[in-house]
Image (cartoon, helix red, strand yellow):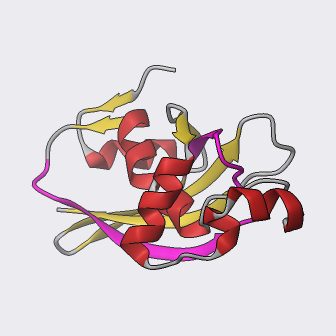
Amino acid sequence: MPPLILESFEELRKFLGQEIAKSDWIAITQDRIRGFAEITGDNQWIHLDSERAKRESPYGSTIAHGFLTLSLISQMFASAVRISGGRLTINYGLNRVRFPAPVLVDALIRATFTVQSFKDLPEGSEVTLAVVVESENAAKPCCVAEWILRHR
């Protein structure tokens, strides 16, 4: 799916309540999981020990960290939406985050973005996006979140 191209951040206002884009698929390899574990210090066996995960995990393989999935939302948004103009867009935070299903090693994930709210601020604007991250061929999403971006 080609990215949504907008002339300004404020154009997001016209999409209130609408799904605006789907990201490209991202491969969640064991190397990516291992790298995330090294950076964050989260070395739990369910993420790193393939043999133990095959034997003891209810998933039958290693799984990605929930925070790894969450951290990829910015990359997924950048592949799905291109916005010109303005000086700065910042990640203002999250209202809600849930991980309803695991991301198995070697899965492909992508995100869908829906404009949930848009408001003007004294020095710019703020959009809240409903983000649903799905894993290819999975019955449930692997992450759902409300993500807030501020733009100046």
Quadrant where the C terminus sits is bottom left
The residue sitting at 42% across, 59% down in the picture is: 35
Please name whichever residue, 115 or 22, is drawn nearer the observer in this view of the structure. Answer: 22
* Image quadrant assignment for residue 8: top left
Q: Which residue is drawn at 16% across and 71% down?
A: 123
Q: Residue furthest toward the front?
A: 51
The one nearer the camera, 114 or 145, is 145
Instruction: Inspect this view and state whether residue 117 appears.
Output: no
Quadrant hosting residue 97: bottom right
Circle count: 0
Residue at point 34% right, 42% down?
11
Q: In this view, does 121 lie to the left or right of 17?
A: left
- Would you say the magenta stretch is mainly helix, strand or loop? strand
Q: Where is residue 98 in the image (x, y as percent from the top left)?
A: 69, 70
Residue 38: x and y, percent?
A: 41, 69
Q: Is residue 152 left or right of residue 108?
A: left
Q: Nearer the viewer, residue 133 or 50?
A: 50
**Magenta stretch in the rendered image:** 86-114
Whether residue 152 is in magenta: the answer is no
> Can you give x and y, in whole percent of width and height, for residue 30 in the image?
56, 49
Query: Residue 77: x percent and y percent?
Result: 42, 45
Instruction: Name the quadrant containing residue 116.
Output: bottom right
Q: Is residue 15 left or right of residue 66?
A: left
